[in-house]
Image (cartoon, rainbow, N blue to C red):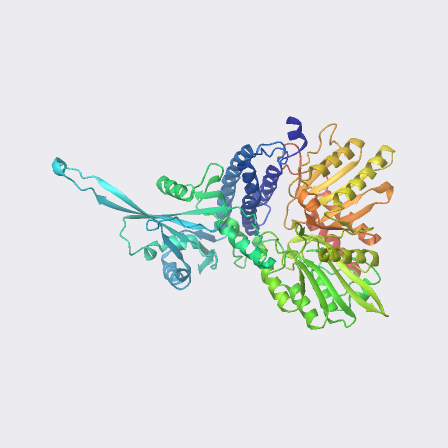
Amino acid sequence: MDTVKKQYVNRELSWLQFNARVLQEAADPTVPLLDRLRFIGIFSNNLDEFFKVRYATVKRIAHSSETGENVLGGRAAKDLLEDITEIVIKQQSESLDILSEIEKQLREEHIYIIDETGVLEAHKAFIKDYYLTKVAPALVTIILNELNEFPVLKDSVAYLAVRMISKKEAQASGIKRFMKSVAVINESRYALIEVPRTIDRFIVLPKIGDVNYIIMLDDLIRYSLNSIFGIFEYDEISAHMIKITRDAELDIDNDLSKSFIEKIHSSVKGRSSSEPVRFVYDEKIEKETLNYLMKKMGIDDMDSVIPGGKYHFRKDYMGFPSLGRTDLQYNSYPPLPIKGLDMEGRLLPVIAKKDYLQYTPYHTFSYIIRFLREAALDPQVKTIKITIYRLAKLSQVASSLINAVKNGKKVTVQIELQARFDEEANIKYAELLQSEGVDLKFGVPGLKVHSKICVIERLEEGNVKYYGFISTGNFNESTAKIYTDYTIFTSHQPILKEVNKVFEFFETNYRIHKYKHLIVSPHYTKSSFSRLIKNEIKNAEAGKPAFIKLKMNSLTSYKMVDRLYEASKAGVKIQMIVRGVCCLVPGIEGLSENIQVISIVDKFLEHPRLYIFGNGGDPVYYISSADWMTRNIENRVEVSCPVYDEDIKKELMDTFEICWNDNVKARRINEQQNNKYRTNDKAKVRSQFATYEYYLKKSKVLK
């Protein structure tokens, strides 16, 4: 057992340490003030998703007859649930302290966040009108005492738990009538107010002089309680926020009469009544109210019950109003052009001669849109095939594909309806694309399609020529502004013919293709990367230089961890940049002393997967949609693409080294899991800013 614990970090606990790194950004005084608030929002949003998915999974294991130790890094599920709750309570407390400090500094910048007790006379008329015209029509208020059954609370919706107290004298009888004091009984009436999600959480009040005032929607509702409950007689009234988080696992039925879209839609709706896994409440709530709610909701000892501050749903801080204060935000860096690709000229003839690398958000995402638009209009282009995992709310990718259909192209879209938390959005896009004539595919039974690929067929001199792009990230122009991701544009015929094979697999998934260039999950990823690692071991044992450089979001596959341990013991030098979960423990003598791991959390979300192997002096490069997680390796369709262009190889190595040399925002991942920043005496390197400068120099060379 101790050996298991030492060799592997539990996935859930490692994830909590990743979220602690996000919280470090909120605490960092060098981060602009409004961006610190947004990191509070990211921290909270991450935690919501963690409980919906990971905590819910551990809870299901705990309810089963299994301990779960084999898959939970040597920890029993019930013990792990307790560990998680303890850590989260500490992190929540820390986040409240950080938020309090940020609000104090905002006041120094003449930005005041007031509550219902601090409303100024000058704002009363505005608040009253705002409540009556915008808030009141959207409120859902439930009087609980009158109900036979307690209502099912929606997942991750903020509620105000209201308690009204009426003080009544007890009925006296007999000799008690002549007593000087009369007993007073408190009668409680309970209600719930659902805080509307259709109204901005932060309401900007009229400015007074040079001072900005903001009131949260929750406090505006508290200020208006008498308007809501005026029909009741009460002596005291209070309202405290609560939130419940439910298991987000989809329960897909087997009704053969339903389409796949209908099944997914039905199971997404079913989330609203799934098992609760976390209950968060304002720690100042009355004990009587808390006990009443927990009893009615059936909260048990395997649920995470977490006391918090006055405000929950703090993910809304990601949308905190900027108030025109650009001085309190990160500088905006305009996305750069790709050297050699002209956005105003044609792309396909240029890509026919050479591969190009797009690295968003340093480069503009518009090249992908431009590629699809050109393909949609080009008379010689006959087909377009693309995978979709998450689209922007208003997607130019989708509109480009519809445009292609209207120009007579055959467009095939593999859309993943089970993309976690984007199911409803993808259902809407699926229905839209289908109605416009796009040929939709819904993946492979039992596998999510997470690959990021596109291939088009173009007739040139009577022959079919392929063009396309392969990416590490979603084809989403919104997230491309904040997610770092690699995309390769190519006309490499052998690679693109294999991309076409992946689409054939979607059609006839009983047929497993062979690939010479691509590495495709679920059939080849583990074996292919294991073979590349073994090759480095062989080189190290032969006295040749041997190294592995890896950049990914998460490493949770124990099998891949074991392969890296084997390489380390053979003397292979391994450098890893892992943003999120890392189950590998670096720096253990005799096991992993040749492995170093860092994590970078900064302005942008580090999202690319890059795998480089020394290969005896002729390094092998892959960009990939797949992290080294069991789900990506065994339960998804993923594509890792080799890089053959020497210029792109240099770019990939350069950008990896810039990240590796970060001594400002890099944290060392170690056995203690303490998120210590990596510092040294070298010149300061903040990798994301340095990467932008790297590409800015390239663009100037272009001019």
Residue at 52% across, 37% down: 85
Q: Is residue 509 left or right of residue 315?
A: right
Q: How many marks?
A: 0
Tell me residue 496's x, y (percent). Answer: 79, 58
Residue 405 lies, in percent from the top left, at 69, 70
For residue 374, above or below residue 211: below
Measured from the top left, where is residue 151 in percent x and y? 41, 50
Asked whether the viewer can see residue 627, the reply is: no
Q: Is residue 161 visible?
A: yes
Q: Nearer the viewer, residue 208 or 304?
A: 304
Q: Residue at x 80, y 67 (%)?
A: 458
Q: Residue furthest front?
A: 256
The C terminus appears in which quarter of the rendering?
Answer: bottom right
Residue 153 position, x and y percent, is 44, 50
The quadrant holding residue 286 is: top left
Q: Quadrant of residue 601?
A: top right
Residue visible at 76% across and 53% down in the picture: 511
Q: Quadrant of the N terminus?
A: top right
Q: Horizontally, is 356 left or right of 330 in the view?
A: right
Front residue of 304 and 129:
304
Q: Nearer the viewer, residue 253 or 397?
A: 253
